[in-house]
Image: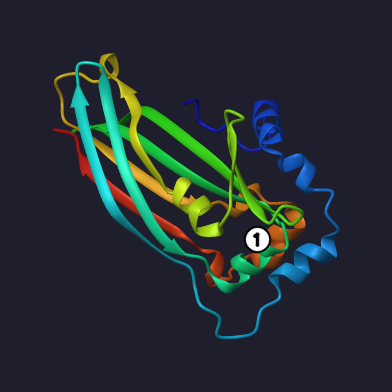
Amino acid sequence: MTPLPPHGSLRRRSVLRALGVAASRVLVPSLWLGALAAPGGVRAAEAELTAFDVSRDEDGVYLNYAVNFELGKGVEDALVKSVPLFFVAEAEVFRDRWYWRDRRIAHTVRVWKIVFQPLTSTYRVTTVGGLSQNYPTRDEALFALSRSSRWKIADAGQLDDGHHYVEFTYRLDITLLPRPMQIGISGQSDWQLVVKRTQRIN
């Protein structure tokens, strides 16, 4: 899958528009801030990898993973108020180089948007490719966007006879939220949901 383009690029804007980010900006700023209001001592976000496997065959490198997490109180409140949330899985494949920094040979990204639909009391999950699906409960929606099976992260031709490894990150990406909301949640622990793993490719 094509990596998410850099900030400020026209291509990034078109990708985010496909996910409905632009539409989310029409929300009233006070609604964003109201969704962020939470008393002190709230539960922070927690995440852990419960499954992680990297395999290689004649077609390329594949990644299986599963992430379990609990949303922080502020994130839960925002989701209930129909604020779109964005989750990103990112995998980078590197080749060891003893004489210089390791060379990145592949970079793949997956992005999901989840939003609560109050009229139907369902949760819609949308991917960058434009595929959407509704789920009756929040847990089912989060389950769908927090794991992947046989995700191809590199082609066979990108690897040589050297030593390679994968750096994986799964996170709640607040940089895809509307700018006023980013300012409001900056530094809040319940929005800092991230898990990372590095593993060699056999």
Q: Position of residue 98 (x, y in %)?
A: 18, 34
Q: Residue at x 55, y 58 (%)?
A: 138
| Foreground of the two, 143 or 59 | 143
**Label 1 is placed on what type of residue?**
Leu
Mark yes or no: residue 11 visible: yes
Using the rendered view, name the quadrant where residue 81 is placed.
Answer: bottom right
Question: Compared to 71, does 126 lie above or below?
Answer: above
Q: Where is residue 131 drawn, in percent x and y?
A: 58, 31
Say which residue appears at 50% left-offset and 45% top-offset.
88
* Callout 1 crowding tier (Cα within 10 Å): few <14, some 14–19, many ≥20: many
Q: Position of residue 29 (x, y in %)?
A: 83, 60
Q: Quadrant of residue 199?
A: top left
In the figure, 67 relative to 149: above or below?
below
Residue 144 located left or right of residue 6: left
Indicate the secondary structure of the residue bearing disc 1: helix
Residue linked to disc 1: 79
